[in-house]
């Protein structure tokens, strides 16, 4: 629902929100007047975007270009590997610096007595964005830590089985392999032929791999290699029917797509925040359904390992409080754009370059063009060229940063724009790909 701004007070309140979210005045190496003008232009662009529906906003290049000024990305390198780690808007970078310098004034006081208490506000904001209770959300450092907490925290017996795919993220694959070696559990492997445009095909693969000994389905919401979206809601529903635990790897979908964790109701969910949320490097989130908290052992032990308090999963010892505190600024910036508006823009950018590069018959896409099966991540290959050679030439000859993928049955180049990426940037990328394909 698009809010009405006929009320002047509501309009001023909304503008004030964007001013606070951006917080750019005084942060750039500009004159004070130029600083203020830039900050106002960015916040006004966000305000204007919010008056448009998500689908109407996707192609307004002028507004997105103005909003992109909030980032400090290199003007010399075209970064199309945001799926690995995304850059942070300047307001987030400044928050990290501010909290870090504050910590250094008197570390044991400001870190333990001031900033440590600030995690509760961050928890509430994350829960609100995730669509769940703050009492089910723990602040971690990345998806690996969050999901490893579940892998090593669940009590399984020798012979218990877990179903997962060979296309899952390596850190998750290795964690379960180690648990298999150490504890004698059994991994039942699925190998998906991607892209898949039929939910029933994926669900059937999980069901067919399931036996009376199956205890867990490890489900990747979006396959990091290609951007394939799996039918996570249907998979979680099927798992519940069979009294099977559902663990969802949401590293590439949180703050990328507009959804609530409660939409698919998993038992456990882990994600990184330094990807699509553009939060500080080394920030993540763990969701544990309330009734599961007491029975999940923390990865880092504390004095109450069987407690039902979600905070037991944050016992880490001394850590840098600055990045986790600045998650709040990242959420404000994300909310300034809007989850659905951001999702539609990202999908629009992926479709934009995909539709153009396939004009050369040597270029093949490895991702669906249907909205329910893909969003920002896109993948392609060029007949006769190795993916590693393509990424090397794109960078050396055109200063375009992408990443090559070679994993299991996948061989391609992954391209991941972000909200600061323009269609003009993608035209440059398309021209480079077509030159490679024509050479």
Image (cartoon, rainbow, N blue to C red):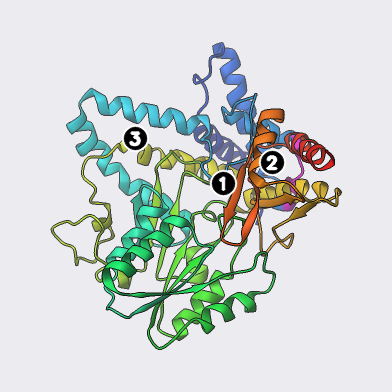
Which part of the image, by quadrant, shows the N terminus?
A: bottom right
Which part of the image, by quadrant, shows the C terminus?
A: top right
Res 53 seen here: no
Q: Depth check: 421 or 169 in front? A: 169
**Quadrant in which residue 158 is drawn:** bottom left
Q: How many residues crowd mark 1 within 10 Å: few (<14), some (14–19), many (20+)? A: many
Which residue is at the far left?
303
Task: Answer with mark 2 or mark 1, whichever residue precedes in sequence.
Answer: 1
- Left or right: residue 171 compared with residue 437: left
Q: Depth check: 435 or 95 in front? A: 435
Give me the disc on residue 322: 3
Q: CA distance from mark 1 to mark 3?
A: 23 Å
Q: Are marks 2 and 1 in contact (CB under 8 Å)?
A: no
**Quadrant in which residue 39 is drawn:** top right
Residue 259 is situated, as x and y percent measured from the top left of the image, at: 55, 61
**According to the image, label 1 marks what residue?**
83
- Left or right: residue 1 compared with residue 117: right
Residue bounds of the magenta highlight: 55-61
Task: Please name the residue shown 19% across and 67% down the image.
Answer: 306
Give me the disc on residue 390: 2
């Amino acid at each position: 629902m698009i809010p009405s701004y006929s009320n002047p007070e509501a309009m001023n309140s909304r503008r004030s929100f964007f001013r606070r979210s951006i917080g750019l005045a005084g942060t750039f190496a500009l004159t004070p007047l130029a600083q203020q003008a830039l900050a106002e232009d960015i916040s006004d662009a966000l305000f204007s975007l919010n008056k448009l529906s998500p689908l109407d906003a996707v192609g307004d290049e002028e507004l997105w270009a103005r909003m992109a000024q909030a980032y400090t990305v290199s003007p010399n390198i075209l970064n199309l590997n945001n799926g690995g780690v995304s850059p942070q808007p300047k307001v987030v970078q400044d928050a990290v610096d501010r909290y870090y310098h504050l910590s250094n004034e008197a570390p044991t006081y400001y870190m333990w007595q001031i900033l440590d208490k600030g995690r509760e506000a961050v928890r509430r904001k994350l829960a609100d964005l995730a669509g769940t209770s703050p009492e089910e959300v723990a602040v971690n450092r990345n998806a690996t830590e969050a999901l490893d907490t579940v892998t090593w925290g669940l009590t399984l017996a020798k012979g218990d089985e877990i179903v997962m795919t060979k296309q899952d993220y390596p850190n998750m694959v290795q964690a379960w392999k180690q648990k298999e070696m150490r504890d004698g559990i059994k991994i039942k492997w699925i190998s998906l032929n991607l892209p898949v445009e039929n939910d029933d095909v994926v669900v059937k693969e999980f069901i067919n791999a399931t036996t009376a000994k199956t205890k867990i389905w490890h489900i990747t919401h979006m396959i990091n290699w290609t951007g394939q979206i799996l039918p996570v809601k249907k998979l979680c529903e099927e798992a519940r029917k069979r009294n099977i635990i559902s663990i969802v790897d949401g590293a590439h979908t949180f703050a990328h797509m507009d959804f609530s964790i409660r939409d698919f109701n998993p038992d456990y969910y882990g994600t990184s925040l330094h990807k699509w949320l553009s939060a500080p490097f080394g920030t993540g989130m763990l969701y544990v359904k309330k009734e599961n908290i007491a029975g999940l052992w923390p990865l880092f032990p504390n004095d109450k390992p069987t407690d039902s308090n979600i905070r037991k999963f944050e016992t880490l010892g001394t850590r840098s409080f600055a990045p986790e505190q600045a998650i709040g600024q990242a959420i404000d910036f994300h909310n300034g754009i809007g989850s659905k508006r951001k999702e539609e823009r990202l999908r629009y950018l992926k479709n934009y370059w995909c539709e153009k590069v396939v004009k050369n018959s040597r270029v093949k896409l490895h991702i669906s063009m249907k909205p329910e099966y893909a969003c920002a991540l896109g993948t392609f290959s060029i007949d006769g060229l190795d993916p590693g050679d393509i990424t090397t030439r794109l960078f050396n000859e055109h200063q375009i940063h992408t990443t090559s993928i070679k994993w299991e049955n996948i061989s391609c180049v992954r391209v991941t724009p972000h909200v600061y990426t323009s269609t003009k940037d993608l035209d440059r990328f398309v021209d480079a790909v077509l030159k490679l394909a024509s050479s």
